[in-house]
Amino acid sequence: MTANAPHPGAAAHPALRPPARPAPAHRLLALLLLTAALLGTAMSGTASAHSTLTGSDPVDGAVAATAPQRVTLTFSEQVALGDDSIRVLEPSGRRADTGELRDLCSGSVVRYGVDLRDGLPEGTYVVAWQAVSADSHPISGAFSFSIGKPSATKVVLPRQEPGGGLVGRLYDIGRYVSYAGFVVLVGGCAFVLACWPRGASARPVQRLVAYGWVAFTAATLALLMLRGPYTGSGRLGDAFDLGVLQGVLDSRTGAALTSRLLLAGASALFVAVLFGPYARREGPGDRRDLVYGLAVGGTIVAAGIAGTWALSEHASTGVQPALAMPLDVLHLLAVAGWLGGLATLVVALYRVPSIEGAAVRRYSRLAFGAVAVLTATGLYQSWRQVGTWTALTGTAYGRLLLVKVGLVAVLLGVGWVSRRWTRQLTETTRVPAYGKDAEGPEAVEDADGAEDGGAGRGDAGRGGAGAAPGAVADPVRAAQLARQRAAVAVARKRRVRDADPARAGLRRSVLAETAVVVVLLGVTTALTTTEPGRTQEQADRMQAATATAVPDRPVDVGLPFDTGGPNGTGTVRLNLDPGRSGGNTLRVAVEGADGRPRDVAELKVSFTLDAQGIGPLPVALDRDAAGRWTARAAQLPMPGDWRIRVTVRTSDIDQTTIDENVKIG
């Protein structure tokens, strides 16, 4: 039920008794879990990881005259790698690297590399890499370069990417089931505690919450076991390897999943108290001493569980993570309160004889608050993850977000229709309370038996099946009469159910609303595995820059300077070879006004890529001779229009800074 549609108030109407064949609570939960899993799995094909490879040295397809000392990879955001994450393979398939990972990160530049062995032969080399991005998704790739001249290679790379195959599908299903179980568990408990205290003793509600806890806990345990093969080998058997599991426990995602399991144990204690001592107490006064403890403890546990997602997925990376993570926790709690409460109301509508109108009104206020929180946090998350209007329609994340917004709009519209049916019912009938004065299932069955059973007994008397005490009944005739009584009872209940058009309309709107919620849950969980639009656009821009980069050629720049002091004029000449992204040799010469080499008190050089917010990247210069300096490891992570900034100091107080933009391929 949406905030604008408190339709389950009509569930308390006497005509809204359980139908002849009510759907059990676990069937509703199974439908939620299965549909979310199938929809999420279907959508996961469009998902990709948060971090992307933005550059390499050597670049893909490069032909080097001599073997490079090192192979480096540059990423758009922080990643986790091990010693075997970057492999350089000779044409024969042998390892060409030393196997030791080097962390070359500097400021905002995320770069890693491996050193190459000496004496490498000519030919084409393959670089295969695999990593885990900061938002927990595995990424991988490969490229080649040649030494001397290209050649054939025997290297065969695995076709299956990390996160794919059977393990990937099982991991995706586990992810979606854990979300659905969390929503049902937290939303069901919140509904009982905040809106319908008497519902704590309703068996269908108890079963629904229990099924939610089991699904959430089992899915979390499965995710912990599958995490190793999901980000590594892709072999299902590695899920039972204790060595692989130890590596998972040492990672941030492993710590989050372990914390989630511990919090699942704490939530089991909460559920036991809610449906045990709290449910057995009769009046509000008897329950008052437990309400505060359950409310505070339940909020802490629910927020802790939501925090395990915020700390290990999209909210923990990108723009403003310190603000995004607490808002993501609020977003998840609001989803659980709204949709989990709706699932509980649907179960109550089909399985519980009646429900107080006050409980429906309280849930309506709770749902309104949840929708307000979802709107505020959703707008912020949309800006943070999408960033531009073009990303809203031009990326998979943006398109999924539009689908989600459309589903929410449909849900609110169906809720408005439900509210109309609810008003018609409440205007003509009085809502009974759920308790001693309410009609329970036994009363319904007794009423049916009184009406239908009488007719049956009359027929039996006419057939001699009950004409006299102790008479032997005809089994065939008795079976016929039993079928007739059952048919009459079903027909009577159908007439009662369909006699009120408002009630029939309400049933249809409730079913439609539930179906929309199931699809909405699948789209929401699919968004967590899809690369945010902001990151996708950045990666596309980097790829476009690489595709249109100028050919490799040395860059020569001459920059006149004047520090304003005595003999403060001259020229700084820079030569960047080979003038492309990756490693370069920078040679700097300082000449005086007479054109002769000249030493200066201080010389600084840095590079800045303003379009991508990279830099300034300082370059360490080594003095070769008077007025001559060299930097043999000037690293430029990607192609683009770089700004070279040079600071020259000719005395203790005379200094100037000059810059020039150059195109780097």
Image (tube, helix red, strand yellow):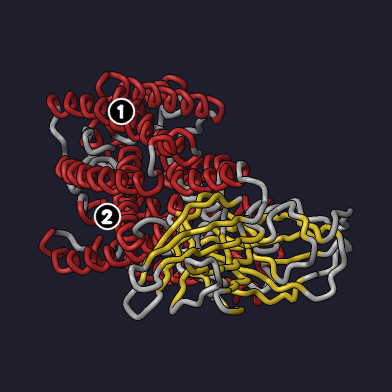
Q: Dot 1 corresponds to which residue?
A: 414
Mark with earlier residue (2, 1) = 2
Left or right, 108 with reference to 278 = right
Which secondary structure lies at badge 2? helix
Residue 595 vertical placement versus 405 (above, below): below
Residue 499 vertical placement versus 51 (above, below): above
Q: Residue at x 43, y 28 (%)?
A: 486
Position in image of residue 431 (x %, y %): 16, 36
Say which of 450 and 379 sits in front. Answer: 379
Residue 23, image quadrant? top left
Q: CA distance from mark 2 to mark 1?
A: 23 Å
Position in image of residue 590 (x %, y %): 52, 69
Residue 604 vertical placement versus 282 (above, below): below
Left or right, 203 with reference to 234 = left
Which secondary structure lies at badge 1? helix
> Mark 2 or 1, which is nearer the eye?
1
